[in-house]
Image (tube, rainbow, N blue to C red):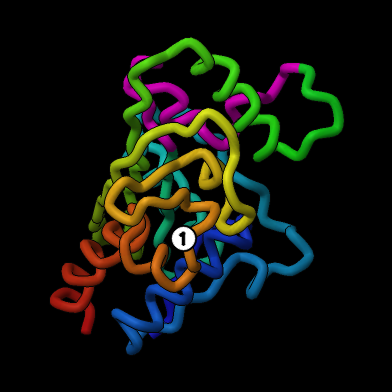
């Protein structure tokens, strides 16, 4: 069985395919770039108020465009001292602000560091919600990963806020963590495990 992972984020696709291959090998996870390399399918407007709502919006949209059973995720970093920000705005946290020619991930990290420079409470967590939609059934899974926000970036692995996210249990940032280990403990891994258990009972 094939399931579409409704995203063009290459890092998410690599993580998702690696995780699915290990825990749900009977399913072939394909990406938007696999079926639409010319990018004729536009992205939907994510105007939900939660990770779940945005995931559902995307899953329904891409299913209706492709008629392929679809999973979509919405994820982000939730920082306690910032009242839960950036949250659902994590991927576009710095948009509209002047960070020169910095790539979006670097600009997002720079903004987060600026907002956190005087904060003693550095606790945060990554959150991920994955929704499956096949035109009839809706399933979802979620996962979280706890950590703290560093005062500067460490490491070049991962993506997004990973170089700023420190895991006490492993005494390392996600930016310094081995990819294989990250894909066994991450919020996305936990969310995929959660939804895979439901899917294996429902569609296999």
User: Is residue 147 rendered to the left or right of residue 76?
Assistant: left
Q: Residue at x 62, y 46 (%)?
A: 43
Q: Point out the residue furthest to the left here.
A: 201
The location of residue 183, given as percent across then percent down, is 40, 67
Can you say which quadrant of the picture contains the N terminus?
Answer: bottom left
User: Of residues 141 and 108, which is closer to you in this image?
Assistant: 108
Is residue 155 visible to the viewer in this orientation of the structure?
A: yes
User: Is residue 165 rendered to the left or right of residue 35?
Assistant: left
The location of residue 75, given as percent across then percent down, is 42, 43
Is residue 67 visible to the viewer in this orientation of the structure?
A: no
Q: Which residue is mark 1?
A: 63
- Residue 2 vs 166, above or below: the answer is below
Q: Residue at x 37, y 42 (%)?
A: 126
Q: Secondary structure at mark 1?
A: helix
- Residue 30 vs 118, above or below: the answer is below
Label 1 packing within 10 angstroms: few (<14), some (14-19), many (20+):
many
Residue 80 magenta: yes
Task: Tell me which segment is drawn in magenta.
Answer: 77-97
Q: Residue at x 32, y 48 (%)?
A: 129
- Residue 156 vs 69, above or below: the answer is above
Q: Point out the residue furthest to the front here.
A: 171
Q: Point out the residue furthest to the right here.
A: 101
Numbered marks: total: 1
The location of residue 143, given as percent across then percent down, is 26, 51
Q: Residue at x 55, y 45 (%)?
A: 163
User: Of residues 2 and 156, which is closer to you in this image?
Assistant: 156
Residue 196 magenta: no
Looking at the rendering, which quadrant does residue 80 occupy? Answer: top left
The location of residue 49, given as percent across then percent down, is 37, 26
Q: Point out the residue furthest to the bottom here.
A: 26
User: Of residues 152 and 50, which is closer to you in this image?
Assistant: 152
């Amino acid at each position: 069985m094939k399931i579409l992972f409704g995203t063009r984020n290459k890092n998410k696709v690599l993580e998702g395919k690696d995780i699915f291959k290990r825990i749900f090998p009977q399913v072939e996870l394909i990406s938007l770039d696999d079926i639409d390399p010319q990018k004729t399918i536009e992205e939907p407007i994510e105007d939900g108020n939660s990770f779940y709502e945005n995931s559902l919006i995307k899953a329904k949209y891409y299913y209706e465009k492709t008629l392929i059973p679809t999973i979509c995720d919405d994820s982000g970093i939730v920082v306690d001292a910032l009242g839960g920000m950036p949250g659902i705005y994590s991927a576009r946290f710095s948009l509209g602000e002047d960070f020169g020619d910095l790539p979006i991930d670097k600009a997002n990290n720079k903004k987060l560091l600026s907002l956190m420079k005087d904060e003693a409470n550095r606790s945060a967590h990554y959150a991920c919600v994955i929704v499956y939609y096949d035109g009839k059934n809706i399933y979802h899974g979620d996962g979280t990963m706890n950590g703290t926000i560093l005062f500067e970036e460490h490491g070049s692995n991962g993506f997004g806020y990973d170089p700023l996210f420190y895991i006490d249990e492993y005494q390392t940032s996600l930016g310094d963590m081995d990819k294989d280990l990250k894909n066994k403990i991450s919020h996305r891994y936990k969310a995929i495990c959660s939804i895979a258990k439901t899917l294996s009972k429902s569609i296999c």
